[in-house]
Amino acid sequence: MFLVSSLLAGILFGVSTYLILQGSFVRILFGFILIANAANLVFLAMIGDPRGRAAPVLAANEGLPMTDPLPQALILTAIVIGFAVSAYFLFLLYRIFLDWKTTDAVDLFKKSKPTDV
Amino acid sequence: MNTPQTSIIFSRVALVVFFIANVVAIYLLLRGHNYPGGGFIAGVATAVSIILLSFVSGVETLHRFFRFDPIRIATVGLLIAVIAGCLPLFLGLPYLTTFNYKWYDVPVIGELYLGTPLLFDVGVYMVVVGVVVKTVFILMTSTFNLTEVMKEEASLYASPLEEPIEEHPVVGSDVFEKEAAAEAARKNLNR
Amino acid sequence: MQVIFPLLIPLLTAILGLLAIRSSAGRRLFFAASAGGQLLFSLWLLASVFSSGSQVMYLGGWSAPYGIVLVADPIAAIMVVLVCLTAFSCILYGFQETSIRNEHPLRLPLIQFLVLGLNLSFLTGDLFNLFVAFEVMLLASYALLTLEADDWDVRQAFPYLAINLFGSAFLIALCAFAYGLFGTLNFAHIAVRAQEMSGEPLLVAFGMLAMLVFGIKAGLFPLYYWLPNAYPIMPIALAALFGGMLTKVGVYVLLRLFGTILPHDMDLLYVVLAWLSAATMFFGVLGAASRPYIRGILSFHILSQVGFMMLAITFMTPFAFAAAILYMAHNIIVKSGLFLVGGAVMVLNRTDKLENTGNLWVRTPVLGVGFLLLALSLAGIPPLSGFWGKYMIIVAGFTAGEYVLVAIAIVTGLLTLFSMLKIWMGSFWQSKESVPVVTSDRRWIPMTVIVGGLTVISLIIGLLPEFFIQMAMTAAEGLLDKDAYIRLVLGDLP
C-alpha cells in the first residue's frame, strides 16, 4: 500500500510539474491544484495502511482496526488552505486575462512597462 | 442583467433542495464535535445551496435579498470563532480550552450536549459560507457580463495549442462553421 | 499567558476594523493605535522573557507532544518585537504616502493579518502550525501585492504566487515526511527523535527538503528571481514591510531547524548551504548594482543580506548564530528605513529612477544624513549597526577556517557600498538643473521623521553594541541548547 501511494504521489508531482511549466493559464492553474493534492497524498501515504490497525486505546468498537486520525485532520486543514489559495489564483489569472487579453504566461513578459515620467 | 432562463422543473426542485441541503448542513454542524461533520463541511453545504438558488433567480436578486456583502458573514463568523477561543483566557486558562456541559433530561430533545466547540464551529460555518458565496458570486457576475464578448474573443480564452474549453461552440463562430463543414465533407465521402 | 496576545491583538484589530469602523480617518486612528499598542506589548513580552525565562502556552490545555504549543523563547520574542516595530513604522509611513481618499479600505486589515501570520510563525512550536502561519502570511501578502497594483504591474504577482504555491506544496510534503520519519510534528519532540536517529541519511534528505522549502521563502540563490520584480510594484510602505520581514521568516526557520531541531552533525547540509548563501550574496549584490531604480536596488540587496545570515547559520557555533541574529535585527530595521527613504525620494523627485533624481542633499540635508547613516550601516562601516553583525560573521568564518567564503563576504560588502554610493550620488549628491525638487509637497517632512526614528534605533544598536550582542548571544545559546528547549516544551516527559 505504501509503495502504491508513493508511486501515485510521485506521478502526480511529475504531472503537475509538467502542467505548471506550460504556458497556458488553465494548465498552470490545474497544475497547482494537482500539486496541492499530490502533497496531501504524501501525507495520506504516511498513515501506512489505509485499512488501519488495531488501536492501542479501548473504544466502543473494540477490536476493529483504526487509522491514524491526525494526518486526516492535517490534510483537511491543508485542503481548506489550498482551496483559498486556488480561489485567489483563479481570480488573479482572471484579472490578468481581463487586463492583458491573453491566456499565455509567455506573452505577459514580452512587453516591458513604459517607464514613468 | 437578465435572470438566467431556467426550466420550471429546475427552479421548483432547486427550492426544495435548498431546504433539504440546509437541514443536512445544520445536522452536520451539530454533530461535528464528536462525529464526522463540522463547521467547514456544513458551510460548504449551505454555500452550495445558496449557489443553487442563484442559478434559479440570478445573482442580483439574491444580492437584493441579502442586502449586504457576504464577506461580512465571514467576518462576523471569524469574530465568533475568536471569541469562542478567548473565553477561557478570562479564567486564566490557555487559549481554546473547551467547556462542555451535558443536560440529561431536556424536554422534547432528551439529551443536550453543548459547549464552546460548537460556538467555534458556528464561526467556521459562517466564514466558509461567506467566503464561498462571495467568491462564486464575483465570478458569476463577471462571466455573465462577458457572454456577449465571447463571440468575438472566444479565441482568447484558450491558447492556440489547446482546444476551446466550451463544449458547445457559440452559434455563428468559426468553430461551429468548421465543424459543420467537416461534417458535410464526411457525409460526402460516405456517399 | 502573554504568548497569545501578539496573535490575538492583530486578529481582533483586523476583524473589528473590518466590521465596526466606517470612516477612513477612524480606521487610520484605530489601526495606528493598535499597532503602537502591539509594539509596547511585544517589548513587554521581550522584557519578561529575558527577565523571567521563556514562556510556553499549551493551547486548549493539551499537553505538549499531543496538542498545539506556542513558545516564546528569546529569539522568538526578539523577532516579534521587530515585526511590531516594522509594522508600526510602515503603517504610519503609509498614512503619509497615500492620501486618505486613495487608501484601499482593506490595506490596514490585511497588514494586521500579515502581522498575525508573521507572529504565529515565530511563536509556533510545531511544524504544521508553521505551515498554517506561512499560509496566513502569504495569503495576506498576495492580497497586499495586488491590492493597489495597476494593469502593468499585476502580472508580477504571477511569478510570486507561482513560486510560493510551489513552496507551500513542498512544505506540506515536508510536514508529511516529518510525520513519517519522527511520528510527531512538535519541534521539541522531533528534536528528541532526531537525536536518536542522528547520522541516518534520511535526516539529510529531510534537511535538504527543508532547505529547498525555506530557501524559496528566504530567496536563496537559484530560487530568488521572483523577489526583486515583485516587491517594487507595491506602495513603498508595504514594500518596506515585505522587504524587512518576509524573507527573514525563512532565515528564522532555518536557524530554528538547524539549531534546535536537527542534530548538529549534518556537515553535507552545511557545506551546500554555505556555498548557496555565498552565491546568493554575490549575485544579489551584482543584481543590485545593475538596477537603475532605487526600489530595484534595495530589493536585490534583500537577497544579498539573506545570504550573509545563511552563511552565519552554517558555522553552527553560538557566536555565529548570535552574529546571524544581530545582523538580522539590524537588517530588518535598516532595510525598512532605506525603503522608506526611497519613498521620500519618490515624493520629492516624483520618480525613483536614478537618472531623473538629484539635488536632494542641497534641498533636504536631513533626509540625506538619514540615508547616509542607513546606507553606510548596511554596507558595514565601523561604528554603525551593520558593522557588528558583519564583523562577527567574518570572525566566525575565520574561526571555522572558511577563508574563501569570508573573502566572498568581504567582496560583497564592498559591492554593497558601491551600490549604496550609486543611490547616494544619483539622488542626493549630484546637482542636476533639469530635476525639480518638490519640497512644497509637505509629505516628505513626516516621512523624514519616521526614517529618522529608524535611523536612531540603528544608531543605538551601533553605538551600544555590548547590550545587543549580549542579547543576541542569549538568544543564540537558547537556540542551540536543545535540551533546554525540550525540557521547556515537553517538561520531564522523555
Image (spheres, coloured by chain):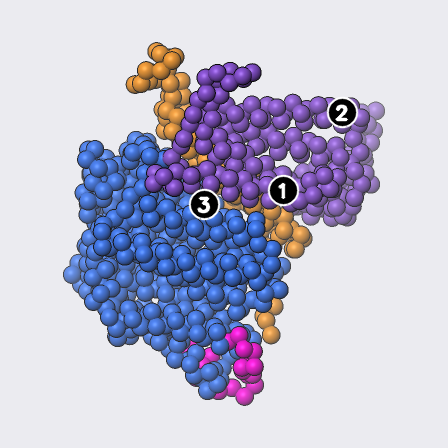
Q: Secondary structure at mark 1?
A: helix
Q: Position of residue C97 (x, y in %)?
A: 53, 68
Residue nearest the observer in this picture, C227 or C76: C76
Between circles 1 and 2, the one closer to the viewer is 1
Disc sitting over residue B70 in the figure = 1
Label 3 – label 2 distance at C-alpha? 41 Å
Q: Residues within 10 Å of mark 3 (few under 14, many from 20)?
A: many
Q: What is the magenta range? A: C423-444
User: For chain A, what colour was chosen?
Assistant: orange
Residue nearest the observer in this picture, B170 or A69: A69
Q: Secondary structure at mark 2?
A: helix
Residues tagged by mark 3 and mark 1 found on one chain of the structure: no
Label 3 – label 1 distance at C-alpha? 23 Å
Between circles 3 and 1, the one closer to the viewer is 1
Residues tagged by mark 3 and mark 2 found on one chain of the structure: no
Residue nearest the observer in this picture, C161 or B113: B113
The secondary structure that most of the magenta stretch takes on is loop
Chain drawn in blue: C
Q: Are marks 3 and 1 in contact (CB under 8 Å)?
A: no
Disc 3: which chain?
C
Q: For mark 2, what is the residue?
A: B12
Label 1 – label 2 distance at C-alpha? 25 Å
Which residue: 51% across, 18% down?
Answer: B106
Dot 1 or dot 2, earlier in sequence = 2
Disc sitting over residue C135 in the figure = 3
- Amino acid, disc 1: Pro
Which residue: 42% across, 81% down?
Answer: C366
Chain drawn in purple: B
